[in-house]
Image (cartoon, rainbow, N blue to C red):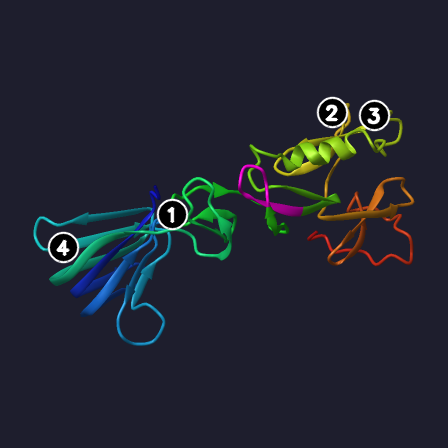
């Protein structure tokens, strides 16, 4: 089941913010406390909260005498005291996103936000930001995704079921020579915070390049492959000056 919940407090409240300056408000407001400890206090006017504290370090509440809530972050404090309480509840919450299929475990809707998650059971799958979720499914029942890492790979969104890293490694491990002068090593496909093509002789040779998003479309003058990306063609080595003159250089953000 989903562990995350949004807490809601509604009623006639006094709201006090204390940081660089102290401000006090009173009215019938609705306060939302999100799972990341962001506190939002809304009234009937406009879209902007009356008061808020983003990702508070701590949020505490006391219902022994009415209701009070205190949120703190660094030197900022947000206090809410209910004089008359209209409602207080916890509601299950999940990330909202574009529907991409059905969860094979519970039948709930799978949606894509920062990753892919089920809105019912809370199963979550991390997917690359540039991945395209396909309509066809894996044998496990989950959708497949299309990701470009030198080639276009179609793999399950669950890394435990079908690994993108393994697919890229099978295709390109030891395919390229280390370009460092005097080094006779091959480039191995590794994961170090992301997919890297790194020299097998590390740490004696620390040459390594992040494998970019895109499909290999040629060879650079330095001998490394070039990748066709969304912003142009680039060498595996993003700092390489040996790109063919006709190929537009991609930005460093690839």
Instruction: Give the residue at x 44% y 39%.
Output: 105
Relative placement, left or right, of 182 versus 107 is right
Q: Which part of the image, by quadrant, shows the N terminus?
A: top left
Relative placement, left or right, of 192 versus 142 is right
Query: Which mark is first along the chain, 1 or 2?
Result: 1
Residue position marked by numbered label 1 in the rendering: 120
Query: Which mark is first along the chain, 1 or 3?
Result: 1
Mark 1, other Cα within 10 Å: few <14 / some 14–19 / many ≥20:
some
Badge count:
4
**Could you say where residue 227 lies in the image, as x and y percent from the top left?**
80, 48
Relative placement, left or right, of 6 versus 64 is right
Residue position marked by numbered label 4 in the rendering: 67
Residue position marked by numbered label 3 in the rendering: 185
Would residue 104 be visible to someone looking at this image? yes
Magenta segment: does it hold 142?
yes
**CB within 8 Å, label 2 to label 1:** no
Mark 4, other Cα within 10 Å: few <14 / some 14–19 / many ≥20:
some
**Could you say where residue 20 lies in the image, as x and y percent from the top left?**
32, 61
Label 3 secondary element = loop
Mark 4 or 2: the one toward you: 4
Instruction: Give the residue at x 89% y 41%.
Output: 222
Quick one: 58 or 151, which is closer to the camera?
151
Mark 1 or 4: the one toward you: 1
Residue position marked by numbered label 2 in the rendering: 202
Query: Which mark is first along the chain, 3 or 2?
Result: 3
Magenta extent = 137-146
Quick one: 113 or 12, which is closer to the camera?
113
Q: Mark 3 and mark 4: span between their CA atoms?
A: 67 Å
Q: Mark 2 and mark 1: span between their CA atoms?
A: 45 Å
Quick one: 29 or 80, which is closer to the camera?
29
Mark 3, other Cα within 10 Å: few <14 / some 14–19 / many ≥20:
some
């Amino acid at each position: 089941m989903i562990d995350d919940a949004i807490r809601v407090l509604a009623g006639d409240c006094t709201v006090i913010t204390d940081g660089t300056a102290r401000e006090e408000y009173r009215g019938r407001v609705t306060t939302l406390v999100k799972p990341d400890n962001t506190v939002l206090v809304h009234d009937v006017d406009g879209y902007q909260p009356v008061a808020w504290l983003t990702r508070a370090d701590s949020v505490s509440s006391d219902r022994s005498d009415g209701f009070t809530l205190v949120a703190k972050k660094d030197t900022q404090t947000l206090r809410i005291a209910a004089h008359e309480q209209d409602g207080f509840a916890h509601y299950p919450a999940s990330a909202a996103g574009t529907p991409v299929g059905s969860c094979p475990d519970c039948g709930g809707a799978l949606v894509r936000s920062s990753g892919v998650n089920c809105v019912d059971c809370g199963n979550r799958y991390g997917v690359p930001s540039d991945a395209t979720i396909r309509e066809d499914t894996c044998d496990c029942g989950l959708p497949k995704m299309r990701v470009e890492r030198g080639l276009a790979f179609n793999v399950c969104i669950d890394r435990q079921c079908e690994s993108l890293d393994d697919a890229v490694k099978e295709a390109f491990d030891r395919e390229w020579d280390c370009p460092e002068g005097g080094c006779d090593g091959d480039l191995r496909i590794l994961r170090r915070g992301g997919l890297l093509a790194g020299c097998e002789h590390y740490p004696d040779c620390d040459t390594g390049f992040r494998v970019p998003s895109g499909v290999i479309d040629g060879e650079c003058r330095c001998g490394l492959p070039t990748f066709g990306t969304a912003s142009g063609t680039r060498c595996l080595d993003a700092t390489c000056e040996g790109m063919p003159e006709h190929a537009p250089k991609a930005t460093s953000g690839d």
